């Protein structure tokens, strides 16, 4: 069954994610994150799983076999384009125990204690109020239920360079520092009412980026929701940040390629029994 949320605040701008839906799965980092999160959770047959910001359903489809025919996976997302792709993929492989729902992950209308496990892949830092979102999700878990999420950790490649350039001009991009250390992830979990199961940092293999591609990265990602504060700054500020960023990547380039080392924090928590 596919449902659409009603009521609540005005629908957010989903154009970036709608536009990305057809090619989202080609980015290997999303599949890597899913593997890491699934490894951090205990999924059993019959479980009810909530996949927050499911996107094209990569995680939802991966976890569905684990819950089996007596379990259920619910994937929620604000992007109709992403959900259309997720539903198409589920139909193609004949998966019947997934329900994709158009909804705001920070204002869900499921009853408390509805789920055994919650996942949030590549999206926690995009929430408008992360502590509140985590408390909300904690309410949706049964006692003893688990949560697993990832956050950018330092180093975070080109995106970190942009965040540092923006900070130098008075623009804070929250994704760069809200949960960039294991300690911050632990504190977020504990403040939301979770017991910390594990938090670890996973580094990715370095993949240098050609200098011209690193510069083009700015223009190709400026409309990303994570950069909203930068997009809403004055044109003069944006120009200054762009100039600073280009200077950084140019100075970092070796043989025409810019190092793009990245890392992720993988956090797992449990609602007290």
Image (cartoon, rainbow, N blue to C red):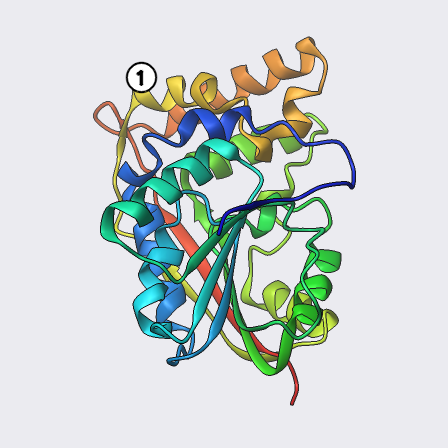
Residue occupying image coordinates x 63% and y 50%: 105
Q: Is residue 111 left or right of residue 225?
A: right
Residue occupying image coordinates x 36% and y 30%: 252
Residue occupying image coordinates x 25% and y 45%: 92
Quadrant in the rendering for residue 66: bottom left
On the rendered image, what quadrant is the C terminus found in?
bottom right
Q: Position of residue 167 (x, y in %)?
A: 65, 33
Quadrant in the rendering for residue 73: bottom left
Residue 83 appearing in the image? yes
Residue farthest toward the bottom in the current orientation of the protein: 273
Q: Position of residue 187 (x, y in %)?
A: 67, 69
- In this view, 110 is above or below 236: below
Q: Is residue 156 left or right of residue 10?
A: left
Q: Position of residue 35 (x, y in %)?
A: 32, 62
- In this view, 132 is above or below 166: below
Kindly state the secondary structure of the residue where label 1 is placed.
helix
Residue farthest toward the left in the current orientation of the protein: 255
């Amino acid at each position: 069954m596919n449902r659409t949320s009603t009521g609540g605040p005005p629908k957010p701008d989903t154009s970036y994610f709608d536009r990305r839906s057809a090619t989202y799965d080609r980015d290997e980092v999303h599949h890597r994150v899913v593997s890491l999160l699934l490894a951090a959770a205990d999924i059993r047959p019959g479980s009810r799983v909530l996949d927050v910001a499911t996107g094209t359903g990569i995680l939802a489809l991966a976890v569905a076999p684990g819950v089996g025919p007596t379990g259920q996976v619910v994937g929620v997302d604000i992007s109709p384009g992403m959900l259309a792709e997720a539903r198409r993929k589920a139909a193609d492989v004949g998966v019947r125990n997934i329900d994709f729902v158009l909804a705001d992950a920070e204002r869900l209308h499921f009853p408390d204690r509805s789920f055994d496990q919650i996942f949030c892949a590549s999206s926690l830092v995009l929430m408008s109020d992360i502590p509140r979102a985590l408390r909300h999700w904690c309410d949706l878990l049964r006692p003893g239920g688990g949560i697993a999420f990832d956050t950018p950790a330092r180093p975070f490649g080109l995106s970190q360079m942009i965040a540092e350039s923006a900070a130098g001009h008075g623009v804070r991009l929250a994704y760069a520092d809200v949960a960039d250390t294991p300690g911050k992830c632990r504190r977020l979990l504990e403040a939301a009412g979770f017991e910390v199961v594990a938090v670890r940092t996973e580094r990715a293999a370095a993949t240098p980026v050609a200098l011209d591609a690193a510069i083009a990265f700015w223009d190709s990602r400026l409309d990303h929701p994570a950069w909203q504060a930068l997009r809403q700054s004055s044109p003069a500020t944006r120009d200054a940040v762009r100039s600073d960023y280009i200077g950084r990547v140019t100075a970092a380039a070796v043989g025409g390629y810019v190092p793009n080392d990245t890392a992720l924090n993988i956090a797992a928590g449990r609602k007290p029994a």
